[in-house]
Amino acid sequence: MRKKILHFRIWPSPPIAVSVEKLLRETFPEYELEIVTLAQRIKADKWLLIRNTLEVLRQYGFDILRGRLDFKAAFFRTIFLFDRVRRMAREIGRGRDDIAFTFQLQSIFDTHLEGIPHFVYTDHTQLANLQYSPHLKVQLYSAEWISREKDIYMNAERIFTRSSNISRSLNEQYGIPAERVSCVYAGANTPTEAIDAEKKDYSAKNILFVGLDWERKGGPELLKAFEQARRKHSDATLVIAGARVKTNLAGVITLGRVPLEELKRYYREATIFCMPSRSEPFGVAYVEAMAYALPIVATEIGALPDMVSNGKNGFLVQPGDVDNLAQALDSLLSDKQKRAQFGKISRRLAEERYNWNAVGKTMRKSIEPFLPLRQAK
């Protein structure tokens, strides 16, 4: 009988969940994959839903009313639900000897099982929010919840992160030894094409934005910066995919939500990618942009300095700095050769670092020492 990987995730359908499921199947073909989708189990328990809703109101009701916290996010961060999910995981694993290891996507719950190797793959920590610019008001969850969060990391053999800033957070803010943390990055979730950066045409001045959360992704700042840049570059265009935006600004094309398969067209037609996020745990759209050989204009926060080397494959500005954002756009709009040079470097970085095959190989190397020798390859 083949041993199993018991994979805990919150949601079944987000692109990252689909990508990680595929990664585990391809990286560990000798094991069966058993998936536990926590949101489905929570929704199926009406008493649990009611009880936790009351806990959300008790713990975070005032902050939700003031607009400081989102109800949906707070729902998954109560002490009650954290402890209930931990018991749920134990019930699932009780008495079983067919589990080789457990693998958890994101760091919201602790699903480790006693005596079984446990691994976490995450793009955030709660305290990493304190790394953002002081002008961004950050509402942390309770100290008691953050204490539970630390338990997640303490109970894992290895924590895999998608960026170096989260690795630093684990080490410096949670006291997790550096040898137990590995930055493995992440790949693109949108199907990409085999782009030959040498043959890509960078003649057009097409800027692309891909994001749903218009405010958090820096959309308002981008519009202001684009308006400035277009005074000099009247032939420039800005395509906004994902967010629903109303604007009469010349040169702006708003698409709203776009199916993942159709996004390929807009990445292919773009010659610059810009998303000046105010906060950004990871930002897979930047990875997708690199895969399509695009120079990137972004903000110097979160995971973005891992992806954008200032002056080499793009430019980094401070969140909210419209003037410098406009200057960065102008620098690329004014120089076709720079767009091409930066784009080629982005593509190379995507090939070497930001692809799921590379992520899987790095993960496997760290996980193998904990696997049964008879099945490890």
Image (cartoon, rainbow, N blue to C red):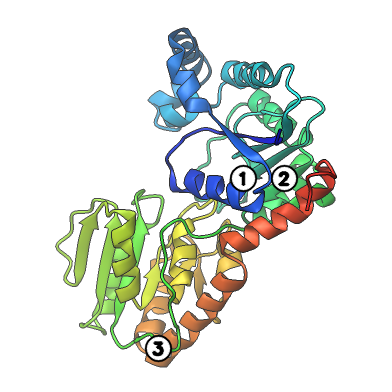
Between the residue at mark 3 and the residue at mark 1, the CA separation in whole angstroms equals 36 Å
Residue 173 position (above or below residue 61): below
User: Would you say 156 lies left or right of 299 here?
Assistant: right
The residue labelled by disc 2 is 159
Q: Nearer the viewer, mark 2 or mark 3?
A: 3
Identity of the amino acid at label 3? Lys
Percent coordinates x, y for residue 338 in the rendering: 45, 88
Label 3 neighbour load within 10 Å: few <14, some 14-19, many 20+: few
Residue at 14% over, 62% down: 248
Residue at 53% over, 41% down: 138
Task: Label 1, secondary structure: give it.
Answer: strand
Q: Which mark is residue 86?
A: none
Of 344 and 361, the residue lying toward us:
361
Q: Are marks 2 and 3 in contact (CB under 8 Å)?
A: no
Residue at 56% over, 72% down: 351
Q: Which mark is residue 122?
A: 1
Q: Are marks 1 and 2 in contact (CB under 8 Å)?
A: yes
The answer to whether residue 210 is seen in the rendering is yes
Q: Are marks 3 and 1 in contact (CB under 8 Å)?
A: no
Which of the two labelled residues, at mark 3 and mark 1, occupies the earlier sequence position?
Answer: 1
> Which residue occupies the extreme left position in the image?
248
The residue labelled by disc 3 is 199
